[in-house]
Amino acid sequence: MNILVTGGLGFIGSHTVIELVKNAHEVIIVDSLVNSKIEVLDRLHEITGVKPTFYQIDVTDEAKVEEIFLTHKIDGVIHFAGLKAVGESVSKPIAYYYNNLVSTMVLSKMCLKHGIGKFVFSSSATVYGDQPSPLKEEMALQKTTNPYGETKAISERILTDVSQANDGFAVSLLRYFNPVGAHESGLIGEDPNGIPNNLMPFVTKVAKGKLTRLSVFGNDYETADGTGVRDYIHVMDLAEGHVKAIENLSKGVNVYNLGTGTGVSVLELVNAFMKVNNVDVPYEIVGRRPGDIAICFADPEKAEQELGWKATRSVEDMVRDAWKFEVDNS
Ligand code: UD1
């Protein structure tokens, strides 16, 4: 297939491009470079042997998006492009609602106009709100704690309504749990601008000495060691999930959790990182972070049953590959 990948130079997008090329798909990348670097394109070339077609555009720009749909024969869209910093979304709600919702509307509109019937969307487990894990796709969505989370829930609604109104428009809503790690080559990985918000990129920067110490947000949750529990998933497993999702897309709206099904606490992840990589990660316990929940992990059965996809990489793989990327790129 010819697949348009928005945000294809970002963390999850770039890893998915590798898997798409590996599975003989042609990729057209669009990325505004607002939170990614053009060097990633060369790295993708190095890893895959193929230099994907690339356009630096913002997908809220309908005229520019349409030019791409007119220039290329596209079979499907995987839409990663979006703003994703939770804290920033609270202080800049309009930027988040505008970017993340207009992009979804522009792309789905173009798909309808140009007869493209396959759409895969980057959603998040955040749409479940605070419900007991394991989280299942059929659970009702709950209000999230921030505008970023709301943009994921509303985008899901928009795409569901568009699909219901248009028979030939099939959608896959992929709810990611906590993507971490990097491609095993160490050539691409997670490279956030500024001080990271998420745990794993923070840990790698502390281990490298670029940040002094990790703050562990709370050890008084109702979990085995008191720290928050999440379902960390290796980004290459996630990338493989996208290829399965677009290749096996059924009619209508399809919702899948992409997680491992196993909860891991903050301290378990940090200890695994130190042990596997033989490096120290100084940390201190501080108060809870507002908006955090105690436990969040997936029931990943549906994706396995319907897509034949299952995460196979271990926590050890995740911490090793995340560290390799940090060491090789700083
Ligand atoms: C966060 C977002 C979620 C988003 C996801 C994307 C919040 C509340 N949620 O999920 O909407 O989809 O990122 O990857 O921000 N932690 C620390 N110290 C740190 C950073 C994190 O102890 O410096 C802890 C957190 O309290 C949590 C765990 O590590 O228990 C994971 O945090 P994080 O990586 O930020 O992901 P989520 O909060 O699960």
Image (cartoon, helix red, strand yellow):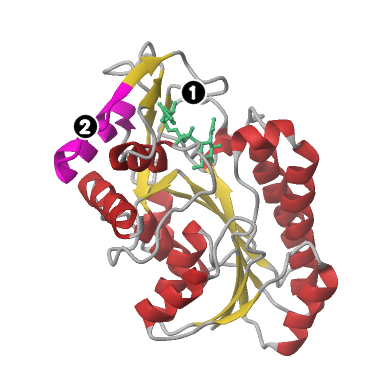
The answer to whether 292 is drawn above or below residue 200 in the figure is above
Range of the magenta residues? 264-283
Query: How far, Cα to Cα, is label 2 from label 1?
Result: 21 Å
The answer to whether 243 is drawn above or below residue 293 in the figure is below
Q: Residue 170 location, x and y as percent?
A: 64, 66
Q: Is residue 298 visible?
A: no
Q: Earlier in the sequence, mark 2 or mark 1?
A: 2
Q: Tell me the element at label 2.
A: helix
For the N terminus, the image quarter is: bottom right
Residue 278 inside the magenta-drawn segment: yes
Q: Callout 1: few (<14), some (14-19), or many (20+) C-alpha neighbours within 10 Å?
A: some
Identify which residue is drawn at 60% across, 36% down.
Answer: 86
Residue type, mark 2 in image = Asn
* Ligand 1 lies under 8 Å from the Cβ of mark 1: yes
Q: Callout 2: few (<14), some (14-19), or many (20+) C-alpha neighbours within 10 Å?
A: some
Q: Tell me the element at label 1.
A: loop
Q: Name the dominant secondary structure of the magenta segment.
A: helix
Q: Which mark is residue 293?
A: 1
Residue 2 inside the magenta-drawn segment: no
